[in-house]
Image: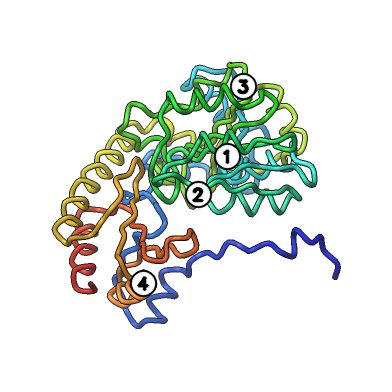
């Protein structure tokens, strides 16, 4: 079968195996998963209650415009509903942006390393990813602005960045925006924005009505604990949203996801508890890494990198056999690093003990 060359050359995203399958394979039980940056507390209780309430309506199609969720988001963010596009996770918003605004051969600037789906979706849409290396673990906005050419249509700014957990400052971001042509779409991916402690971090929505084209991506997967429902959203100029809605499937967010996200938005107690759990967990883990003599990288997210100074894959395998699942980072260009998501206090302690045994 003949397929476009840019599709045939794609390197697919390889997901991890289900925890149950790993336990069967390795003959273990009681594993903890600290590999996927998920919420350690589970889903929002209010979301669970709302989900249970709509299960009787599963024979109905979801609301095509996500009326209640978009209106609640607009109210909470103090913007018009016409600025909002909901997606099957914020991943779908990336795909919709590529499908709507990219033509074959157009260039998209992406930081490296960063979220792997940027490159996959851009190349899958016939675009050309232009990679710009990080500088001291942080997005090099100066070099990214310098990489803009007449073919550039989009720039991804992952802030905070996955996998490094770092942010760009507001001053650097605004200086970067001044250098970017207004017709180039700057996509600010804020999947982890709720966990940021550094007050110097810019917020994408502040630039929604500026003279530059800034799109902000957010998700319910992390801080709200709804990763399994796959729901996120994009905030953008009304003209961009109007174009995207022309190609967006009418039922791209399902009934259960809409109900869960709507309830989670108002679960302030759960959100506060999540953030406190993550921040306390990070402070504990930082101290333990120092005791172990391991170099770690402070983060503005719910995960962080550790430099093991040795092959991370072998450490990952040994930890896995002890029922502790972390993420080796060779796919991101860090063969000696692992990425650890913050867990519950008892999970964090088990992680430390297991890491101590292994190294």
Residue 49 screen position, x and y as percent: 41, 42
Q: Residues within 10 Å of mark 4 (few under 14, many from 20)?
A: some
User: How far is the residue under mark 3 from the one under mark 1?
Assistant: 14 Å
Cβ–Cβ under 8 Å for marks 4 and 3: no
Using residue 67 as the reference point, say whether residue 24 is left or right of it. left
Q: Tell me: residue 333, above or below residue 159.
A: below
Q: Tell me: residue 313, above or below residue 200.
A: below
Q: Residues within 10 Å of mark 3 (few under 14, many from 20)?
A: some
Q: Which residue carries the number 1 mark?
A: 156
User: How far is the residue under mark 4 from the one under mark 3?
Assistant: 43 Å
For the point 22% across and 69% down, the residue is 354
Q: Name the N-terminal-most of marks 3 and 1.
A: 1
User: How far is the residue under mark 2 from the one under mark 3?
Assistant: 23 Å
Q: Secondary structure at mark 4?
A: loop
Q: Residues within 10 Å of mark 2 (few under 14, many from 20)?
A: many
Q: Which residue carries the number 3 mark?
A: 212
Q: Name the N-terminal-most of marks 4 and 1.
A: 1
Q: Which residue carries the number 2 mark?
A: 114
């Amino acid at each position: 079968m003949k397929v476009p060359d840019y599709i045939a050359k794609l390197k697919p995203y390889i997901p991890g195996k289900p925890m149950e399958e790993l336990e069967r394979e390795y003959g273990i039980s009681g594993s903890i998963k600290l590999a996927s940056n998920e919420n350690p507390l589970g889903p929002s209780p209010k979301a669970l209650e709302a989900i249970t309430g709509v299960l009787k309506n599963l024979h109905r199609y979801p609301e095509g415009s996500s009326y209640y969720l978009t209106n609640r988001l607009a109210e909470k963010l103090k913007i018009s509903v016409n600025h909002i596009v909901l997606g099957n996770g914020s991943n779908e918003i990336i795909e919709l942006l590529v499908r709507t605004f990219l033509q074959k051969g157009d260039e998209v600037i992406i930081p490296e390393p960063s979220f792997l789906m940027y490159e996959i979706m851009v190349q899958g849409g016939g675009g050309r990813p232009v990679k710009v290396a990080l500088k001291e673990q942080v997005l090099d906005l100066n070099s990214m602005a310098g990489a803009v050419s007449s073919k550039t249509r989009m720039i991804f700014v992952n802030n905070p960045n996955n996998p490094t957990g770092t942010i760009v400052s507001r001053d650097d971001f605004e200086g970067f925006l001044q250098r970017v042509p207004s017709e180039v779409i700057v996509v600010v991916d804020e999947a982890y924005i709720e966990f940021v402690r550094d007050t110097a971090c810019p917020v994408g929505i502040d630039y929604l009505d500026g003279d530059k084209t800034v799109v902000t991506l957010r998700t319910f997967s992390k801080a709200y604990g709804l990763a399994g429902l796959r729901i996120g959203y994009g905030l953008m100029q009304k003209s961009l949203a109007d174009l995207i809605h022309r190609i967006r499937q009418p039922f791209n967010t399902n009934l259960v996801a809409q109900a869960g996200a709507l309830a989670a938005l108002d679960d302030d107690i759960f959100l506060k508890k999540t953030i406190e759990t993550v921040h306390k967990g990070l402070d504990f883990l930082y101290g333990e890494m120092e005791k172990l003599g391991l170099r770690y990288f402070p983060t503005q997210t719910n995960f962080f990198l550790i430099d093991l100074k040795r092959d991370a894959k072998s450490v990952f395998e040994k930890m896995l056999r002890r029922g502790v699942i972390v993420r080796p980072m060779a796919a991101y260009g860090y063969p000696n690093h692992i990425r650890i998501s913050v867990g519950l206090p008892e999970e964090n302690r088990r992680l430390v003990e297991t890491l101590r045994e292994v190294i």
